[in-house]
Image (spheres, helix red, strand yellow):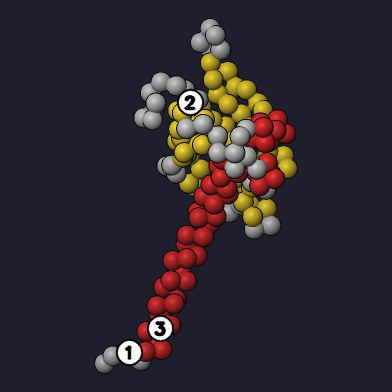
Amino acid sequence: MPLPKYTLLILTLTVFSFTAQAQTAEDSVKAVINELFMSMKESDSGRLSTCFADSAILQTISRNKQGATMVRTDAIGGFKSSITAAPKGALDERISFESIRIDGPLAMAWTPYSFYYNGKFSHCGVNSFQLVRFNGVWKIQYLIDTRRRNGCEGG
């Protein structure tokens, strides 16, 4: 016996509703990270500010001249200033989402990237994001990355 058309419509909407709800948290984590990189590309520190928590921490893992691993901490204000100083369109960080994990108000995203300045390859690495959901909105709390010029697909 065929289902009445309203029953089929309700079942279809219910399935789409559950699918949308299942994707919402991961998609919203991706959205704030994508907003960060669009803000960089547009040299828009105002938009960039909306991506970070008030107490956010930025760090980079690199090597000193002797080859020893070191971790450099950058101030959010200095990062924003460098974004504003760049010509619009000059900063192009191309990422892929390799892994996203979410537990309530905590999310982690692992995003390999290639960075281009004025269309020219500069370096590559991996970003490791820790995000916190404040009042229903994801914010970047902690970002640490690696940077290298060798072993990159784009360079």
Chain-order first, disc 1 or disc 3:
1
Which callout, 1 or 3, points to the residue nearer the camera? 3
Q: Which residue is tagged 2? A: 122
**In the image, what residue type sits under mark 3?**
Leu
**In the image, what residue type sits under mark 1?**
Leu
Q: Residue at x 54, y 9 (%)?
A: 65
**Vertical placement of residue 30 versus 79, above or below:** below
Where is residue 70, by image quadrant?
top right
Chain-order first, disc 3 or disc 2:
3
Q: Residue at x 50, y 65 (%)?
A: 21
- On the image, the x and y values in percent for residue 101 come to 49, 47
Q: Which residue is tagged 3? A: 9
Q: Residue at x 46, y 69 (%)?
A: 18
**In the image, what residue type sits under mark 2?**
Ser
Is residue 57 in sight in this rendering? Answer: no
- On the image, the x and y values in percent for residue 66 come to 53, 7
Query: In what quadrant of the picture does the N terminus appear?
Result: bottom left
For residue 151, side relative to residue 128 (left or right): left
**Vertical placement of residue 71 versus 84, above or below:** above
Q: Which residue is tagged 1? A: 3
- Circle 1 SS class: loop
**Vertical placement of residue 97 versus 59, above or below:** below
- Circle 2 SS class: strand
